[in-house]
Structures are given as structure tokens and as C-alpha cells.
Amino acid sequence: MREQFQEELDGVSATLVQMAGLVKVAMEHATTALLTADLTLAEKVIADDSIIDDMQHELDARTIKLITLQGPVASDLRTLVTSLRMSADLERMGDLAHHISKSARMRYPATAVPPELALTIEDMGRVCVKIIEKVATVLQNRDAERALEVEKDDDEIDALHRKIIQTLLDPNWTHGVETAIDMTLLGRYYERCADHAVSIARRVYFLVTGTYADSDK
């Protein structure tokens, strides 16, 4: 019974890693669609978001069943309860890639991002993908040290987000209110995606060490 239960626990962890992989691809494709006005790619990200949603629902149902039927205690219970929260973070990260792709679709055939912000958005997408890749590694290896790195990586996203706001507030901004709203939302989507990644990394750190990570580390 214990061996079977351990296999089920390992399956929960493996599904979280798989979800992180799908989220990484979604964010990568969403950014490309946004910057190149690739409608086909945008539609694919939008459609594939349901795969991530379904995985979360199935994983949560499995997790709740394990908690109910197996009556786990101590670290096993902590792992299962934490997985519910991490799956919600990953699902939300997928939703944010979905929102970015909808912005690309909404402005098609034009490119949603004005030239002076294209590099900043490209950098935000690149850093987000890097953070998601790191989160997948942290989940797979229960790597507490790398978990601490995610919060530092998030500082890059915050700096790029501030750069967008500064550009929008510049008196020389000529693209109007509608584009400014688009860019404000897009910057927020990337920033929130990174925040969810930080949340996952903190939970993994807690699972491994039994203590909460110092946010100043």
C-alpha cells in the first residue's frame, strides 16, 4: 500500500512538471504571436489553454482523492495540499499566456506592440520563459537553492515592467490611449506570470526545508 501511495505522490509531482512544460511553451508562443502578428500561433495558444485547464482539474481530483482515501500525515499531506496550490498557479500562468495571445488576435493584422516597446516585450517574454523553465526544474528536483533564484529572476521582470510604464508616461508617446491600455495590460500579464512562478518556488522551498524562504534572499 505504501509503495502504491508513493507512486501516486510521484505521479502528482510529474504532472506538475508536465504542466510547467506546457505553460512554458504557451508563453513562448504567445510572445512570438504578439510580436509577429501570427494569428495561427495565437489561436493555437488560445485553444491549447484548455489542455492545461483539464490537467489542473484532473490533478486536483486525484489529489483530493488521495487525501480523502489515504489519510496522509506530516510531509505527505503537506506535499498534497501544496500541489493543489501549485496547480492553481500553473493554470493561472497558462491563462496569462492565453490573454497575451488574445491581445495578438484582437489587433491582427496589425502588430499589437509599437516599435519602441517591442524589445522590452521580447525581453519580458524571454525572462518569463527562463523563469518557468527554472520552476519546472525546481519542481522536478525539489531544488531549494534554485527555488531561491526565482525571486531574483522576478526582479528582472519587475524592472522591465517599470520600463513599460515609464515609456507610456513619456510626453513623446504618440500611440494613443488604446495602445497604452494594451501595453499596460500586457506588462501586467507578464509580471503576474512571474509572480505565480515565485509563489510555486516558495512552496517548493517550504516542502524541502520545512521553513518559509526569506524574501530578501
Image (tube, rainbow, N blue to C red):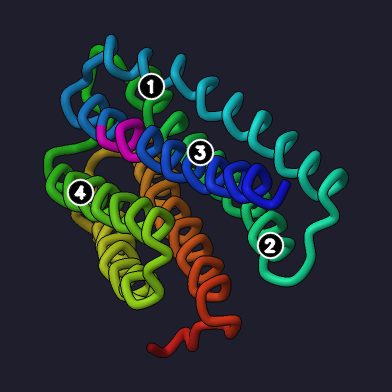
What secondary structure is marked by label 1? helix
Q: Residues within 10 Å of mark 2 (few under 14, many from 20)?
A: some
Magenta span of residues:
24-28
Give coordinates of residue 175: x percent, y percent.
Answer: 26, 39
For label 3, the residue is 15
Q: Which mark is residue 76?
A: 2
Residue bearing mark 4: 126
Q: In 3D space, how far apart are the residues under numbered discs 2 and 3 (Cα atoms)?
A: 16 Å
Secondary structure under tag 3 reads: helix
Amino acid under disc 1: Val
Q: Residue at x 51, y 60 (%)?
A: 200
With 117 as the anchor, is 84 left or right in this view? right
1 or 2: mark nearer the eye: 2
Which of the two residues, 67 or 44, is positioned nearer the viewer here?
67
What is the quadrant of the C terminus in the image? bottom left
Q: Earlier in the sequence, mark 4 or mark 2?
A: 2
161 or 47: nearer the eye? 47
Question: Is 78 contained in the magenta span?
Answer: no
| Residue 171 in view, yes or no | yes
Q: Which residue is mark 1?
A: 45
Q: Quadrant of residue 58?
A: top right
Q: Earlier in the sequence, mark 2 or mark 3?
A: 3
Q: How many marks?
A: 4
Q: CA distance from mark 1 to mark 4?
A: 17 Å
